[in-house]
Amino acid sequence: MKKQSFLRGALVLSLGGLLAKILGALYRIPLTNILGSYGMGLYQLVFPPYILFLTVAQAGVPAALSKLIAENNQLGQRERGRKIFRLAFCTLALSGAASAALMAALSKVIAASQGADTSAAFLTVAPALLFVPVTNVLKAYFQGNMNMVPSGATTVTEQVIKLVTGLSCAAHFMPDVQKAVLGAAFAVTVSEFSSLLIMSAVFLFHRRRQSKLVVNWQQGEKKSLMGAMLSLSVPVALGGFAMQTAQVVDSVMVVNLLNTANATEMYGLWTGPVNSMLGLPIALSAGVAVSALPGITKTYCDGDGQKLSAGFNSAMKLTFVIALPCALGMICLSRPILRLLYRSLPEQEIYVSSMLLSVSGISIVFLALVQTCVSVCQAVGRPYATVVIVSLSIVVKAALNMLLLPLPSVNVYGAAISETMCYLFAAICVIIYLKIKVGLKMQASSVLKPLAAGLLMTLFITAALASAPNVFGTSAGTLALIALSAAVYAAALSLLKTFDRQELDLLPVKNRKVNTYDNGSGNGAQG
């Protein structure tokens, strides 16, 4: 597989994922304005357990499937790839159905552990646990065959359906908050079912155009293929499970540990407006970083330490370049941005949300670094290390939650502090691990130049707000200041010559031919 094809495919998935994240954030903005902080708190309580059930149901199989199909296609063993697909399809259909039934059965128990009346919402989203794994198997089939468009397009379409259905249902049932929350939860099931129908139609159309391959199972072959699939999927599943456990920790601890009558409202502000803002730059940094990483697997397998170090530092620099301005900008402009987007929230809730965003804004950088380093660990064949590190970081998060949330002087800000420290701990550990075990050392220039550009942008924002608060305090002024700050940051990066020519060639833009790393076949399937 040519590197340009891989990068183009990675870019399609990255842009599709980013657009889906943007639509998701845009969905939560009007949804918060409709439901209010209490309704949004109930709505957001549903998803940490839901995603945890989903992680278990999928068990990392879609990622393993796409890799195995691609590898077998490279070897000309298309029949073997077809067998793996059938095995994965049946496995996830069964595990999805079991997960849906288990969530429905445990809905009251989970709601009781959260201290809120969310059992009906869990029943509403439970069917999606069947739809999503099957849909992702179909997406993995196309990804393994290096066709990324169905996955990217379906992901965006799914978000559009959820946005339209969710806002319509929520607005229809208000002012009954409970029914409005159920309507928004129902939109998730509708969108996932629609996604399954779309992917099924695309798959059937695709199969009609392909030559039919006869699948003949040999004795013991199913067991062998299942073992190969699980050997790849287990570390992915464990990593995903660990990451989602952090969100479940918040969903249980924040509401139960806060010494305040409006704990659900506070949780709604933390997971609604604040996390919506934090999620956008994370999606962007993850997408661009992934699109620059394919060469790492190849150079590691070739034993070229110099190129491996160069690829690692280019990826880390890209991560800093994207994450730093977003973090600093949200810290400086948290209140104007939230006031611009969430006009229906009371001023006191805007203030609390802005403080939460300011406290947790720097976690954008730490989480972006963790995501990039996790990809590097997978590329160099050390996926289990990140599972251990992320698990330890969750222990840190839970301990800080227990210490800080009950304190009246800290209140819900304890959740922001614990999340920031959680990702800081994980980032430090994984960077140290890569240095000791793999020999990958992060160069000072990867950090200092983006940091210098970011600080210059921060100085510009501070000076603008101080000199003309009435101008830049308005909605139009806030948008103008964001645009001007981005221009200042871009100019600073250029003046500092942050990227050299080889690093620029890593980026899949302007349809350039990528020459930095000579590509081999097969490794691209890692994506």
Image (cartoon, helix red, strand yellow):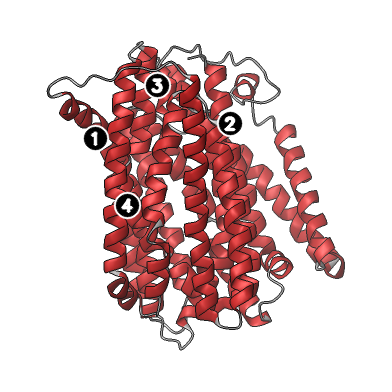
Q: Is residue 298 visible?
A: yes
Image quarter where the C terminus lies is top left
* Disc number for residue 11: 2
Q: What percent of the width, then of the height, locates residue 522?
A: 40, 17
Outermost residue toward the bottom in this view: 261
Do the residues bearing badges 2 and 3 touch, measured as CB atoms within 8 Å? no
Q: Amino acid at mark 1?
A: Leu
Task: Measure the C-alpha gap from mark 3 to mark 4.
Answer: 27 Å
Relative side of 271 to 112, left or right: right
Q: Nearer the observer, disc 4 or disc 2?
A: 2
Outermost residue toward the left in this view: 219
Q: What percent of the width, then of the height, locates residue 141?
A: 42, 30
Do the residues bearing badges 4 and 1 touch, measured as CB atoms within 8 Å? no
- Where is mark 1, residue-wise? 230
Q: Along the polypeptide, which appears first: circle 3 or circle 4?
A: 3
Q: Nearer the observer, disc 2 or disc 1?
A: 1
Image-quadrant location for residue 332: bottom right
* Disc number for residue 70: 3
The residue sitting at 44% across, 11% down in the picture is 520
The residue sitting at 60% across, 24% down in the picture is 503
- Where is mark 4, residue-wise? 242
Q: Amino acid at mark 2?
A: Leu
Task: Measure the C-alpha gap from mark 1 to mark 3.
Answer: 16 Å
Task: Measure the C-alpha gap from mark 4 to mark 1.
Answer: 18 Å
Judging depth in this view, the residue of 223 and 365 nearest the camera is 223
Q: Label 3's element?
A: helix
Q: Amino acid at mark 3?
A: Ala
Q: Along the polypeptide, which appears first: circle 4 or circle 2?
A: 2
Do the residues bearing badges 2 and 1 touch, measured as CB atoms within 8 Å? no
Q: Residues within 10 Å of mark 3 (few under 14, many from 20)?
A: many
Task: Measure the C-alpha gap from mark 4 to mark 2.
Answer: 27 Å
Q: Along the polypeptide, which appears first: circle 2 or circle 1?
A: 2
